[in-house]
Image (spheres, rainbow, N blue to C red):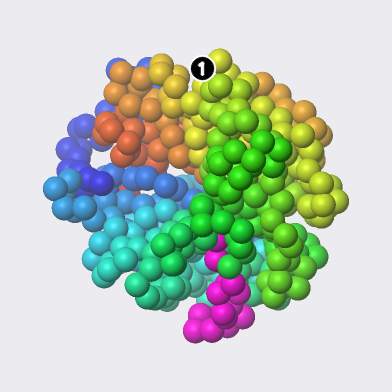
Amino acid sequence: MRRVFLFLSLLITMLAGVGSPRGFIKRVHAQFPQEIGAQRAPAIDVDRNDSLYLFMSAATSPNTVPHSQIFFTISSDGGATFDNLPKTLNLSNSRGEAFGPAIVVTKVGKPKVFAVYQDNSPGPTHAHIIFSKKRTNFRDPVDLAPGATGSFFPRVALDSTGATNIVWGDTANLGRHVTFVRYTSFDFSFGAPARISTASDGAFNPDIAIDLTDAINVVWEDTAPSEGSGAIQSSIMFSRSTDHGQSFSMPRQISKGPGNAAEPRIAVDQSNGIHVTWADHSSGDNEAYYSRSTDAGNTFSAPLNVSASPNADIHKPVLAIFHDRVFLSYEDDADPVQEVFLARSNDGGGTFLRPVQVSHADPRRGQGHSPAMVVDSQGKLHIVWIDSSVLGRQEGILFYSNSADGQTFSSQRMILAAL
């Protein structure tokens, strides 16, 4: 990742959208930094007052010195402004590569923020957590899995007691496994890790969601033999705990097609319905698939191809739920598309409307990718993504937009990581 020096005139040009096919880009702030960090992997959540909490990975060194941090900014006015300028808050202060934040914010009482990410400093890549007991007053990072083996792609969820529930992929014993741990105190010093994926050494990239009964729902990608064919391929697996993580159900396969399935994400609704999305190659192209369960994960609906785009190359699908509305966003890396899209369901995931384009990257220079989104208490969708056409390559600038209906969107605005 790159640390970038921006001349004021260049930044103003980008903010105004001059000479750019992406259209009008709303100015975020009257102050401009001289240096910014190239951004990747955003994450966003909302508190009960509809304040937005935005995390991202951002470069803090020149391109010749790999180095990135977890940066944070907040909007207290529903996305109208963010406090990222004149300087964005660095939370990780890593000596290496801090990357891939996932966050959750409490919805009752005073807001508390929990962010997990992976960091390769000082040795193997480990899962870390940063948390605040009072809104934006953050503690120092804590290594969740110290030791010689790696721990990757951590994800976090809270239950009704305030306990922190975390999953990650680990590489213990020369395999790949999904590990779960639950913490009931703020020192994160106890809680025996439990392995959820027990049948194979090819489990990775998990996600977690907790419903209103405090049942813990976990999905991951696994290269165990596929149901039906028995062929070794990547499939999407699901497991559930109803006793605060003391035990988990036998893993169940959700993806059913002949192609590889990967990059799963999970969400739950207010009726405890379970919603899962992933990228699936069963149609011959990499598409965004979706399935739901209305019986606590005992059965799942037949996988639905939501993107249904010829020659698609879908990655990084994500979900957001509000009552019967299911929002599914993803990036399509197929040339010449290379943009972020959003599909909406108005019937709890039974059917989806045709996806609409959200990002507007310059296809001559880069693409829109890595969407993250959340729905506030009024049903407004807030979505962020990375536009690499500003800086080139996969690194880019974070953009924000919102929508009341998932069909039309506000003017996109640039959210810089100011150094």
Which residue shows up at 49% across the image and 72% down it?
A: 132
Task: Where is residue 310? Give x, y as percent.
Answer: 56, 15
Figure label count: 1
Q: In terms of image quadrants, where is residue 379? A: top right
Q: Is residue 2 on the magenta stretch?
A: no
Which residue shows up at 75% across the image and 49% down it?
A: 274
Label 1: which secondary element: loop
In the image, taking residue 178 as reference, residue 1 lies left or right, namely left
Furthest-front residue in view? Answer: 230
In this view, the residue in front, 338 or 236, is: 236
Task: Kindly identify the amino acid type of the residue bearing the numbered disc 1.
Answer: Asn
Residue occupied by mark 1:
311
Furthest-right residue in view? Answer: 295
Residue 251 in view in this figure: yes
In the image, taking residue 192 as reference, residue 99 lies left or right, namely left
Q: In terms of image quadrants, where is residue 118? A: bottom left
Q: How busy is the neighbourhood of tag 1: few (under 14 within 10 Å), some, or many (20 plus)?
A: some
Which residue shows up at 25% across the image and 46% down it?
A: 1
Task: Where is residue 272? Give x, y as percent.
Answer: 80, 54
Q: Is residue 190 on the magenta stretch?
A: yes
- 274 versus 325 height, above or below: below
Task: Where is residue 51? Give x, y as percent.
Answer: 57, 56
- 13 versus 131 height, above or below: above
- 17 versus 200 height, above or below: above
Which residue shows up at 37% across the image and 75% down it?
A: 147
The part of the chain drawn in magenta is 178-194
In this view, the residue in front, 331 or 410, is: 331
